[in-house]
Image: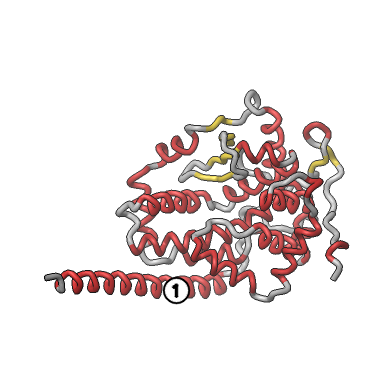
Amino acid sequence: MNYDDFDTSYGHGDDTGANGEPRATRILSGISSRSWEHSADRAALAALRKLPGFDQVLRTLFGIFGEKPVRLAFQANAVRVGPNQFPHLWDLYCEVCTTLDAPERYPLFVSQNPVVNAGAYGMKQPFIILNSGTLELLTDRQVSYVMGHEVGHVMSDHVLYRTMTVLLTELAKLGFPLVGLAARAILIALLEWSRKSELSSDRAGLLAIQEPDEVMGSMLKMAGGGRDEETSLPEFIRQAEDYRQSGDMADQVFKVLNLLGQSHPFWVLRVSELRGWIETGDYDRILRGEYQRRGDPDPAYAEDLAEAADSYKTGAREMLGQMAGAARRAGESFWDSFRKQP
């Protein structure tokens, strides 16, 4: 296969948005988040909710932190975007929300942070934070993709569990007593789900701007930085193709990430997954208006989700048993050594 001949231009709308730049014209009225959600995301989330002790850990976190303190902690070092602050960014954000027909304009903040990233957080009241480094590296269309990605997280009801993941991760780093064996197993499951939820929101971000080449160009920049003249999107897609040609390589990468404690999958893997979704025709069908609307009956995924949930639950129990056994053996070794002291 000649990777230099990859077609990275899938087309986009012919209308214009802010400052006369091309923008998506297909308003996805009433679209349900189920239209873009990756099956692995939905299965992992269903399984996560069935993990032993999950509800207790969630209630404990709510009890310790509460809604308002968490919201203020995330927003304290950021500036809220609106008509009078970052007005151009606000216009882009409104276009994104209109295209995805978001139920509301979720609060958007810009934080002075050079790391190219963004996040959607909250417990009952979701909000989005965009790092200033993202605005420096990406074009307007690419920033719109990132904002659409985060709006996708909100519309898919990811924010509570994403916030929970951040809190548990930070508590684990501090050695907080809450993060015992059960909570650590839940954190591992949360991280696995978090990576798969990114695949869903990548699709939402694409639908928000409807320009695949801009989305994959964003991923290229966020993977390695660099200016447009220094990089090649076809070459980056060649890396992505290597994953798809390696059979179950993506699953193996996810297993490695379990050990590394990563909350996001590798960008090359995300390009591969997104291209696969486009090539199935699902993306084009949505643009033609063939998508599930909010309030429509949910398709019959129950059996698949139940099977996946059982698998995750069994794995979690095995993990808990292994961790408990390791802790018990460590304790016995300690006391044996202590008793042998003169």
Q: Which percent across, then down, holds residue 218?
A: 72, 49
The front one of 170 and 126 is 170
Q: Which percent across, then down, holds residue 263?
A: 53, 56
Amino acid carrying label 1: it is Gly
Residue at 69% x, 69% y is 243
In this picture, residue 307 sits left or right of residue 272: left
The front one of 248 and 62 is 248
Residue at 67% x, 59% y is 270
Secondary structure beneath dot 1 equals: helix
The front one of 228 and 172 is 228
In terms of image quadrants, where is residue 41?
Answer: bottom right
Residue found farthest to the front: 342
Q: Looking at the picture, does residue 28 appear above or below residue 297? A: above
Q: Which percent across, then down, holds residue 207?
A: 72, 51
Mark 1 lies on residue: 315
Residue at 44% x, 37% y is 73
In terms of image quadrants, where is residue 289?
Answer: bottom right
In this picture, residue 310 sits left or right of residue 79: left
The front one of 17 and 113 is 113
